[in-house]
Image (tube, rainbow, N blue to C red):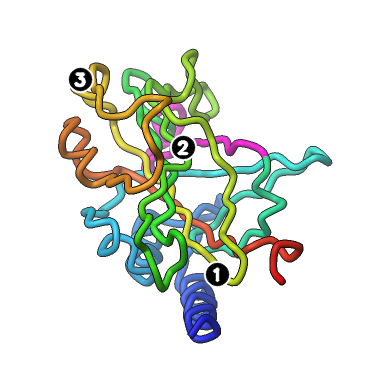
């Protein structure tokens, strides 16, 4: 069963990669990201409406100074996810400064694992691996803030023998209600989170952008 599920995720990753179209800048189009999410059953499993209007870039800095820049559905070795990711938000069809996130807006970004403890048994899902608010765009489109994340980054750690997990990044335009939310803080359990319910209760609505990766257990953790 584990082999079948692992094979299925590999097929999803392969099919997703073959369907993604890129702009001249090398970025996937918003429609291509939407199709990748649908192929991986992410909107259904997270019970979200995903019709992105922007592109969420996710990058992991490596010890040698290089970065791993995610394409939707990319398989990423766990050891390449050790550092907290950086984010950038871009709006296709705009040029110059307006192609980056609106200078007057702030944003919320989540990282969610919907496959805990395994894709076959999602009884702990969702796990909240990151939740940051008050994110604003710098002049390069990168998202930054001056406050601590509500949930600091937690590196993917799929348990031994599990198939690869989907790790989903979602960006929302920050709502007024989010600033005063008390549903989640640094001490709130990260297990059994529900991003759809949280977004509804804090007025975030639907995500404006997303990305995701597949991470399998580290080789040294598999018996």
* Residue under the image location 54 percent in, 71 percent down: 163
> Taking 163 as reference, is 197 above or below it?
above
Q: Please state the horizontal and vertical placement of residue 8, each as a whole percent of the image.
A: 47, 81
Per the model, the C-alpha gap separating discs 1 and 3 is: 39 Å
Label located before the other in sequence (1 or 3)? 1
Badge 2: few (under 14), some or many (20 or more) residues near its Cα, within 10 Å? many
**Is 104 drawn above or below residue 44 in the view shown?**
above
Q: Nearer the viewer, mark 1 or mark 2?
A: 1
Indicate the secondary structure of the residue bearing disc 1: loop
Image quarter hosting the C terminus: bottom right
Asked whether residue 220 is drawn in magenta, I would say no
Viewer-proximal residue among 173 and 81: 81
Q: In this view, does 176 lie to the left or right of 166?
A: left
Quadrant in the rendering for residue 95? top left
Q: Residues within 10 Å of mark 1 (few under 14, many from 20)?
A: many
Confirm whether residue 92 shows in the render: no
Residue plotted at (41% across, 73% down): 120
Q: Name the residue under label 1.
A: 162
Q: Distance between the residues labelled 3 and 2?
A: 20 Å
Q: Residue 94 versus residue 18: which sits nearer the camera?
A: 18
Disc nearer the start of the sequence (1/2): 2
Q: Given this view, does label 1 or label 3 mark the residue nearer the observer?
A: 1
Is residue 88 at least partly visible in the picture?
yes
Magenta stretch?
83-99
Q: What residue would you read off at disc 3?
A: 176
Q: In the image as oriented, which residue stretches furthest toward the right?
A: 64
**Mark 1 to mark 2: distance in Å?**
21 Å
Residue that numbered label 2 is attached to: 130
Q: Give coordinates of residue 97: x percent, y percent.
A: 45, 27
- Residue 218 rendering spot, x and y as whole percentages: 69, 61
Asked if marks 1 and 2 touch (Cβ < 8 Å), the reply is no
Q: Which residue is drawn at 37% across and 72% down?
A: 39
């Amino acid at each position: 069963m584990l082999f079948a599920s692992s094979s299925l995720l590999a097929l999803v990753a392969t099919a997703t990669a073959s369907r993604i179209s890129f702009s001249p800048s090398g970025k996937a189009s918003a429609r291509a990201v939407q199709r990748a999410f649908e192929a991986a059953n992410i909107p259904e499993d997270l019970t979200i409406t995903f019709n992105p209007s922007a592109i969420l870039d996710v990058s992991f800095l490596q010890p040698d100074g290089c970065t791993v820049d995610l394409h939707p559905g990319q398989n990423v070795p766990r050891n390449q996810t050790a550092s907290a990711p950086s984010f950038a938000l871009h709006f296709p069809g705009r040029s110059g400064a307006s192609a980056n996130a609106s200078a007057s807006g702030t944003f919320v970004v989540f990282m969610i694992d919907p496959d805990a403890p395994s894709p076959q048994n999602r009884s702990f899902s969702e796990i909240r691996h990151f939740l940051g608010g008050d994110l604003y765009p710098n002049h390069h489109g990168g998202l930054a803030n001056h406050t601590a994340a509500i949930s600091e980054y937690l590196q993917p750690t799929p348990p031994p023998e599990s198939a690869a997990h989907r790790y989903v990044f979602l960006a929302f335009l920050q709502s007024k209600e989010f600033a005063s939310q008390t549903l989640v803080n640094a001490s709130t359990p990260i297990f059994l989170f529900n991003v759809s319910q949280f977004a509804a209760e804090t007025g975030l609505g639907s995500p404006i952008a997303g990305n995701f990766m597949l991470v399998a257990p580290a080789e040294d953790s598999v018996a």
